[in-house]
Amino acid sequence: MTTTQQVPAPGAPAPGAGRSGGYATAVVAVVGMELRQRLRSRGWYIMLAVWFGLIWLVTALSWMSWKAQSGYGVDPGFGAAGPGPLIFEAVLAFVLLFGLLVAPAFSANAISGDRAAGTLAIMQVTLLRPGQLLWGKFLASWIAALAFLVVSVPFLVFGIAQGGLGPVYILVALLMLAVELGVVCALGVGISALANRPLFSIVVTYLTVAVLAFGTLIAFGLGMALSNGTVQANQMHYQGMEVYQEEPGAAEADQELYPAVPRPTDITDENDQYACFGPLVEQPAARSERVAWMLAMNPFVLVADAIPYTQTAAAAGNHQPTALFETISQGARYAQAGPDTTYSCAGGKVSPEYLEQKTPLWPLGLGLQLLAAAAILAGGWRALRTPAGKLAKGTRIA
């Protein structure tokens, strides 16, 4: 005895679809089906093994380079902090860079590949709704990408264990890395739903990631060139070269190169090296604060700005950031502050060497990324609705 399954008419609600439990059950079913297909592939485990080996190599080389520089008496830049910041930053940069390259591979052909293989139409005639199919594909690709992030956790923990950083660094870094991988997977799934060809969806997804990683930097550079302005500033003198020499007997050449000037009133510490003096003059300067928002969507800027750095270099007697992501974070803060804060002697004050985070840039960037991903997923949802009013020429149905 055989039974036949009744397929509801187009546009009719699926049984149990109005309940959140039924909707979630269908999404979980799609996720399970996708993950089982990936786990059956031997290439999946090979990729994880290669990923593990590459991160181990990056960690080992970072640790050995720090030991080599320390052995020769060269300060690697972290002082007493140890190799922890160097290892952490190197692994973090590697995971983010190659995560942006790996994530599109799991999502860019999630739906267009099924369409090309003729299996998408079979799923569409079931009780699955377009939203359930999209959510299932997205979550499956995100979980697959997170597996590579999980593999890198021991190496990030190893970097933290070497000292110089606290556990909050790795927690925030892992959370932001996971979110960035999710955004890229959402973009890939949405584009794959809109595209008819797997190759086209893959290329467009990688181009979108390139726009986020490099296009934002290009746009910021062009915006800086167009954001001309002025700032009121005076002159800076270096106290360490005896600018304020007032005792008799100073060398005549020094007096010509560094004439005696009145000691500025803004010097409160005898160890201050720089000081500003003279009348304020209008100086040309790029108004970077007008275009700083263009950096917000950059994944590297977003992750770096979210990590709660507390001037790790200051503990080593240095007032300049030494870590890669800390330097990126400082660059974003300098762009936000503009020349009124960062220009030499702007307003008659010495510009700070290290800027504290007043207004974080990463919430704006994350919001713009999520908005773009939601718009593309909405377009993909419309493309998956059945019955389709019109199909592109050459589209395979089954």
Image (cartoon, rainbow, N blue to C red):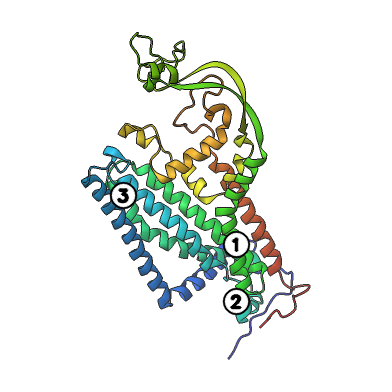
Quadrant for the C terminus, please. bottom right
Q: Quadrant of residue 386?
A: bottom right
Towards the viewer: 169 or 204: 204
* Dot 1 crowding, Cα within 10 Å, few <14, some 14–19, many 20+: few
Q: What is the x, y in percent for residue 54?
A: 35, 63
Callout 3: SS: helix
Tell me the residue that label 3 is attached to.
159
- The relative height of residue 179 versus residue 103 in the rendered view (above or below) is above
Q: Does residue 20 appear in the picture of this structure?
A: no
Q: What is the x, y in percent for residue 253?
A: 39, 19
Towards the viewer: 49 or 389: 49
Q: What is the x, y in percent for residue 372?
A: 64, 54
Task: Of the two numbered discs 1 and 3 on the same chain, state the one appearing first in sequence.
Answer: 3
In the shown orientation, is residue 163 left or right of residue 223? left
Q: Residue at horizontal 62%, vertical 56%?
A: 373
Q: Quadrant of residue 189?
A: bottom right
| Kind of residue sitting beneath label 3 | Gly
Callout 1: SS: helix
Q: Does residue 329 appear in the picture of this structure?
A: yes
Task: Of the two numbered discs 2 and 1 on the same chain, state the one appearing first in sequence.
Answer: 2
- The relative height of residue 217 versus residue 341 in the rendered view (above or below) is below
Quadrant for the N terminus, please. bottom right
Tell me the residue that label 1 is attached to.
207
| Kind of residue sitting beneath label 2 | Asp
In the shown orientation, is residue 106 left or right of residue 121? left
CA gap, disc 2 and disc 1: 22 Å
CA gap, disc 2 and disc 3: 41 Å
